[in-house]
């Protein structure tokens, strides 16, 4: 009857937007809930968007359904292919009231998922968890609902990934400020990273050679693969390649400088 | 290239009208202090962007064909004054504008629909305590070819309605090739003045001291994250520990250079055509002036001859009636193309210097 979600993939944008909405919640609100949008193909769920739905918590829960519908329509206008796949809530547990909200979403879509983001940092980290619900109990008696956890994956577009990598650089700075677009700094950082990795590998190999650590043939194979991937060029060919590249680059650079000079000249002349 | 421009032309013209009514939109949704109007004219120091905004822009661009189609949207946030005189713009959220295809509203006008969409969105934002002051717009752009007439006109409308408007340009291609490319721009006061006068003659340009480098200013962009977002970043690193994507180590410079050069060539061609037009205009102007002079001299000579003979003088005719003044030529295109070329040159220079360092590194590694 219910389609059990097999695989949940979440785009980082969704998580960022949940965090943002939590930071902007109304005073005295303990949590934020909202809809998750995306695609659900045979239980393979991809969550790409989310929006907050205002609600009232407490003894009884009330969800602004009208608001949810309007927001949904707005999202459809930008990307018509998305539909509701579930809902999110902040916090790390699932209170009783969640069942009621879940029931609403079960009417909106088949087998909705429930995503929790622990913005209270109970385990000192914002845990992200996904659940689906299933009925539990003895037939013809009182039925209960349990939320079964599903493993999640974070997937992102290449550019999203690159941006997140960039953002990662800012988390240890005091001002929490990042300036994008400094190529050389990036280059240096990457080289440092590679240097570190090489060092740790060398250390490992040395230890194995000295007999301190047991040999692992898998790692050995990977190492051989890496060494194999370096093309062997004789110095002559390499030299020609390098010179050619350099010449190309130099010429292009020269050309572009020439164009720039021409531009300025053109402008000055036309104003006379 | 022409395809691209056509694309951008069609989409841009769609947004221009919503822009015209932006100010009224901001008023529709009451702002606590309609900041943009109250802050006196002062310099904008820098633009501060939330991670969420960057990701939303990227997502919107990806979903509209990875940058093949133009993705545009509205930026919301606030204007902060610091130390009395300088201010920074904080972009805290954004939303995409739908394309004409996705807005199926029967016969209603696209612009009208778009306006309704924007107002609805702003109302939603207000309801959710999100900053709902429009402070500009964003646009995706492949290879940085965004400087064109539509772009300038669109932005002029934003900036004349809302003083502190900025535009953020996101380049998916450059981002995938190494450096995340987000740039913020606005028009300089002189350029605004020229747009206001709607007069792009060479005299105005001379008057306002405009050149291809100073009609647009780039604002530095910084990204700032809350602590909670930073902790999320740590969590993301745990959940998805793939190594960083190091595409800027790519030694194959051919394709990028080729693309850049190709667009450069196209633009230089356009500039040549434009310059030819300008020269032509000059020639005509000179010719006309010459004719005018001749005519005046002739009249003068005849009049003095008549005076000598005692005949009545020929009436002074309106010289402008005989020689219609030539319509002043617009130099706006030239400015824009020049700026675009300048952009390409800068990109090429950046790229080559980056490639040089890569090459030198490779050489060093190889020699070992």
Image (cartoon, coloured by chain):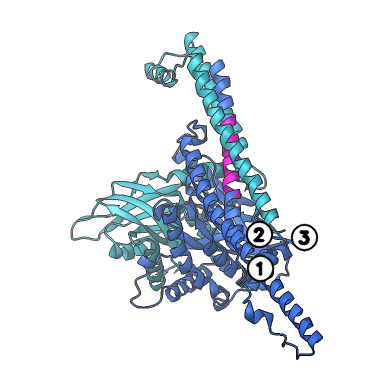
Chain colours: A cyan, B blue
Give how far across and how far down residue B154 sits, in percent. 54, 66
Give how far across and how far down residue A41 sits, in percent. 27, 52
How far apart are the two marked residues, 1 and 2, measured between alpha carbons? 10 Å
Which stretch appears magenta? B342-356
Q: Are marks 1 and 2 in contact (CB under 8 Å)?
A: yes
Q: Earlier in the sequence, mark 1 or mark 2?
A: 1
Residue B343 drawn in magenta: yes
Instruction: Tell if the residue under mark 3 belongs to the same chain as the one under mark 1.
Output: yes
Q: How many marks?
A: 3
Q: Secondary structure at mark 2?
A: loop
Q: Is residue A196 visible?
A: no
Q: Secondary structure at mark 1?
A: helix
Q: Main secondary structure of the magenta part?
A: helix
Q: Residue at x 54, y 27 (%)?
A: A194
Q: Earlier in the sequence, mark 3 or mark 1?
A: 3
Position of residue B216 in the picture relative to residue B139 (left or right): right
Q: What residue sits right under mark 2 in the picture? A: B215
Give how far across and how far down residue B208 sits, in percent. 72, 64
Q: What residue sits right under mark 3 in the picture? A: B83
Q: Residue furthest top?
A: A210
Q: Residue furthest front?
A: B309
Chain under label 3? B
Q: Residue at x 57, y 41 (%)?
A: B348
Q: Earlier in the sequence, mark 2 or mark 3?
A: 3
Q: What residue sits right under mark 1 in the picture? A: B194
Chain under label 2? B
Q: Are marks 2 and 3 in contact (CB under 8 Å)?
A: no
């Amino acid at each position: 009857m219910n389609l059990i979600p097999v695989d949940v993939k979440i785009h980082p944008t969704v998580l960022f937007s949940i965090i943002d909405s939590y930071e902007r919640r109304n005073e005295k609100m303990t949590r934020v809930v909202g809809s998750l949008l995306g695609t659900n193909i045979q239980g393979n769920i991809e969550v790409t968007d989310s929006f907050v739905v205002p609600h009232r918590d407490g003894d009884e829960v009330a969800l602004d359904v009208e608001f949810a519908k309007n927001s949904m329509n707005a999202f459809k206008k930008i990307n018509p292919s998305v539909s509701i796949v579930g809902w999110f809530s902040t916090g790390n547990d699932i209170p009783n009231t969640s069942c009621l909200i879940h029931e609403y979403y079960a009417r909106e879509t088949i087998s909705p998922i429930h995503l929790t983001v622990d913005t209270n940092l109970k385990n000192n980290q914002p845990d992200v968890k996904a659940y689906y619900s299933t009925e539990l109990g003895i037939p013809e008696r009182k039925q209960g609902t349990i939320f079964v956890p599903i493993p999640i994956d974070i997937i992102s577009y290449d550019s999203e990934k690159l941006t997140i990598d960039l953002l990662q650089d800012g988390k240890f700075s005091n001002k929490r400020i990042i300036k994008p677009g400094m190529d050389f700094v990036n280059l240096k950082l990457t080289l440092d990273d590679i240097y570190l990795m090489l060092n740790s590998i060398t250390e490992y190999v040395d230890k194995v050679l000295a007999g301190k650590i047991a040999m692992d043939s898998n790692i050995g194979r990977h190492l051989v693969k890496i060494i194999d991937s370096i093309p062997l060029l004789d110095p002559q060919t390499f030299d020609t390649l390098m010179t050619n590249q350099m010449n190309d680059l130099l010429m292009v650079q020269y050309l572009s400088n020439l164009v720039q000079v021409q531009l300025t000249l053109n402008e000055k002349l036309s104003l006379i | 290239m022409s395809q691209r421009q056509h694309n951008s032309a069609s989409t841009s013209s769609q947004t221009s009208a919503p822009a015209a009514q932006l100010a009224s939109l901001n008023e529709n949704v009451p702002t606590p202090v309609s900041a943009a109007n109250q802050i006196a004219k002062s310099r904008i120091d820098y633009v501060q962007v939330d991670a969420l905004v960057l990701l939303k822009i990227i997502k919107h661009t990806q979903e509209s064909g990875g940058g093949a189609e133009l993705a545009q949207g509205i930026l919301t946030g606030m204007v902060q004054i610091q130390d009395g005189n300088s201010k920074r713009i904080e972009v805290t959220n954004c939303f995409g504008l739908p394309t004409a295809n996705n807005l199926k509203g029967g016969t209603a006008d696209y612009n009208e629909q778009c306006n309704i969409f924007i107002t609805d969105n702003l109302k939603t934002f207000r309801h959710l305590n999100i900053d709902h002051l429009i402070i500009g717009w964003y646009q995706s752009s492949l290879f940085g070819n965004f400087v064109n007439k539509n772009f300038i006109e669109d932005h002029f409308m934003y900036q004349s309605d809302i003083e502190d408007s900025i535009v953020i340009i996101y380049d998916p291609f450059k981002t995938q090739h190494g450096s995340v490319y987000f740039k913020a721009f606005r028009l300089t006061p002189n350029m605004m003045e020229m747009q206001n006068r709607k007069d792009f003659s060479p005299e105005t340009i001379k008057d306002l001291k405009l050149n291809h480098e100073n009609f647009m200013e780039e604002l530095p962009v910084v990204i700032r994250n809350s602590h909670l977002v930073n902790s999320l970043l740590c969590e993301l690193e745990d959940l998805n520990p793939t190594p960083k994507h190091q595409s800027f180590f790519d030694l194959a410079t051919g394709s990028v250079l080729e693309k850049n050069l190709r667009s450069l060539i196209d633009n230089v061609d356009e500039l040549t055509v434009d310059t030819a037009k300008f020269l032509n205009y000059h020639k005509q102007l000179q010719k006309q002036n010459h004719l005018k002079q001749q005519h005046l001299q002739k009249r003068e000579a005849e009049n003095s001859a008549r005076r000598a003979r005692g005949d009545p003088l020929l009436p002074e005719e309106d010289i402008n009636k005989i020689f219609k003044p030539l319509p002043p030529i617009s130099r706006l295109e030239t400015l824009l193309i020049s700026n675009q070329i300048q952009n390409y040159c800068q990109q090429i220079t950046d790229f080559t210097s980056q490639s040089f360092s890569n090459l030198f590194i490779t050489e060093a590694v190889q020699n070992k």
